Every structure is written in C-alpha cells, then in structure tokens.
Amino acid sequence: MNNDLTDLAGVRVGHAQDQRLASGVTAIVFDRPAVASVSVLGGAPGGRDTALLETDMTVETVDALILSGGSAFGLDAAGGAQAALLAMGRGFPVGDMRVPIVPEAIIFDLLNGGDKNWGAKPPYWEMGRAAVEAAMRDSSVALGSVGAGLGATTANLKGGIGMASGQSRAGHRVAALMVVNAIGSATIGDTPYFWAAPYEKGREFGARGAPASMPHDGLALRIKGHATEPATTIGAVITDARLTKSQAKRLAIMAQDGLARAIRPAHAPMDGDTIFAASTGEKPLDEPMMNLTELGMLAGDCVARAIARGIHEATALPFPGALPDWRSRFG
C-alpha cells in the first residue's frame, strides 16, 4: 500500500497549475468508466454535472472527475478535460458521437494573492485538458500545493492536496484525494495538533498525536473571512469494490464524516463541501451490508487523514500576507 490513489488499479491522477495565478486543476481519470455518485453538504457548493450522479439519474458511470480552483470560473476545466478524453475515444455513446462524462467540483481561491487578471478568457479550460493529459502520461502522487491545491487555504494555515488509503478485512481497497480549502481549521487552536490525529497511520502527517489536554481556547470558532468568504473542501473516495450507484452514494455520505472529524467547523453556510465516490468494480462484495459499512468507515478515516496530509505537505504562497504553511510554523 502506497497510501495514495495508486493503490487502486486503473486510476490516474494529473495536475495542471499556474504559479502566477496561484490556482490549478487536478484530474482523476479512470482507465474504464467507473460507477460514481456524490455527496454535497456545504452551503455554497460549486459543481458541474453533479446532479447526474444522483441515484435516480440515468448515466451510471464517469470517465473522470475534475477538482479545480477558480470558483465558478474554474467550471470551464471540465470542458477541457472532456476535449482531452474525446480525443482518446472516451465517452458515453450517443449515436455516432461520444460524450465524456466528467463531473467537477470547485474551490474558491480568488482572494489568495495570485494575479487573477486573466483577460478575456479564464485559463481553466486549458488547465483541465492539461491535467487529463498529465494523468495519462504519468499518474501523480504529489501532495500539498499542487494542482487544485496550489491556491488552497484554511482559517489559519496554507491548504493543499492530501491522499490516504486503507484496506478492509475483506480485501477491498479505498483511497481518498482531498483538496483542503476550508473555512475552518484542521488544527486544534494555535497548536500543531491535527483534529484528525486519532486516525493517523505511521508518521503520515508528523505523528504529533493529540495534545495532553484540550487548550482553553481549542474549541473556539476559527474561520477565515468572517464567515463571508466562500471556501470549501472537495475531493473523492475511490474503491475497487464493485458498487452500485446507490452504494456509491452511501459511500460518499459516509466519507463526509471524515471531513467533519478533520476540520472545525465543517459544512458551514459558505462552505461547498463536496465528496465524489467512485467504484472501479474490481472486487465483488461478499457480504454487501457488512462490506459497505466497513468501506464507509474506512472512507471517512481516509478523508480525515488526507485532509491532515494536505495541510502537512503544503507550501506557503509567495505573496505578501500569505498564510504560513504547517512545516514552517511547527515543523
């Protein structure tokens, strides 16, 4: 186990980014269409084709998932990703045409100090295409300030991309990729300790553990932008278990528990907290109820761990007034 999405066969990750812009795009591409659904619990979400993933909708599988910066401007990234996939012959067949199915979620990173004066055309369409092409060339396991996580921030520290994986007793694997751009904080008060500490495996985010006692202000509200700045943590959990669309929906819902374990507060009015769940269908469920229950628990754990890793591996943006990264402050 590599503790990232490479633990799942047939899943690729690619990033594209612009350092001057301080924003980017991450693509999760499936070698074969994957059954997928989604859970959206934030009060201010941004997404494309997320309604398609509800269990009463017709199309069951996706070719890729896109996670992007840029707020609503970043929704163009899915179009670029579709163009790249169409050139590969991918997509849902409709007569003589194919339509690649590429749902997307976005984060708000427009106030992070980067130069957003992009002129007549936002750059996200091109970055969406580039992220898919990068995934097909060489799947990435990069963490921290990369791709959609380049411009991510939290209430007190630089955010970024994190990944984590686990395996059930029945041998099913599940992995999470999260873009941490929360309105809240992933650490306890002013300490280096992560809310996700109880779920850490090895030293994946520093092995600091939990504080001996809760700081007197550890539970105080810490948010960015006085609760008026949009923010969100988005991501995906992928499993090799063979799931139906309804089962993928339940996996996405249970995975949201990990977000609430790792960030305080979560699912706020100006958050957009969105988690996709996808199945590559490699291994059937022997005991569907038991297997899915354990997979959902593990998915939540992986989401919490991935969030902490995204903070732990991030690098501060090179702009005046930028938030510090975890390592420079506590490392």
Image (spheres, rainbow, N blue to C red):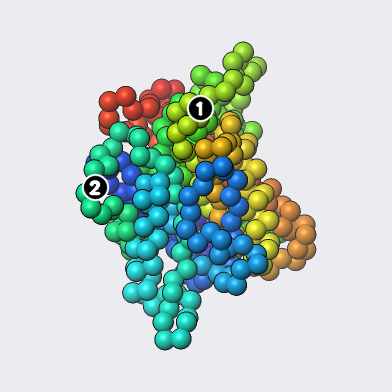
Q: Secondary structure at mark 1?
A: loop
Residue 98, visible in the rendered structure = yes
Image height check: is 224 above or below 102? above
The residue most toward the left is 119
Disc 1 residue type (three-letter): Ile
Q: Residues within 10 Å of mark 1 (few under 14, many from 20)?
A: some
Residue 206, horizontal then vertical, whole percent? 50, 31
Apparent side of residue 235 relative to residue 286 in the rendered image (left or right): left
Residue at the spot x=63%, y=36% of the render? 261
327 or 279, nearer to the observer: 279
268 or 245, nearer to the observer: 268
Disc 2 residue type (three-letter): Trp
Residue 204, horizontal then vertical, whole percent? 51, 38
| Among the 4 quarters of the image, the one containing residue 137 | bottom left
Q: Earlier in the sequence, mark 1 or mark 2?
A: 2
Residue 97, horizontal then vertical, whole percent? 41, 82
Residue at the spot x=54%, y=49% of the render? 274
Residue at the spot x=65%, y=43% of the render? 257
Q: Secondary structure at mark 2?
A: loop
Residue 105, horizontal then vertical, whole percent? 47, 52
Screen quadrant of the C terminus:
top left
Image height check: is 28 above or below 189? below
- What is the C-alpha distance between the residues marked 1 and 2? 29 Å
Label of residue 118 in the image: 2
4 or 310, nearer to the observer: 310
Residue located beneath label 1 in the image: 223
Residue 211, visible in the rendered structure = no
Apparent side of residue 133 relative to residue 331 in the rendered image (left or right): left
Residue at the spot x=34%, y=68% of the render? 84
Q: Residues within 10 Å of mark 2 (few under 14, many from 20)?
A: few
Image height check: is 119 above or below 205? below
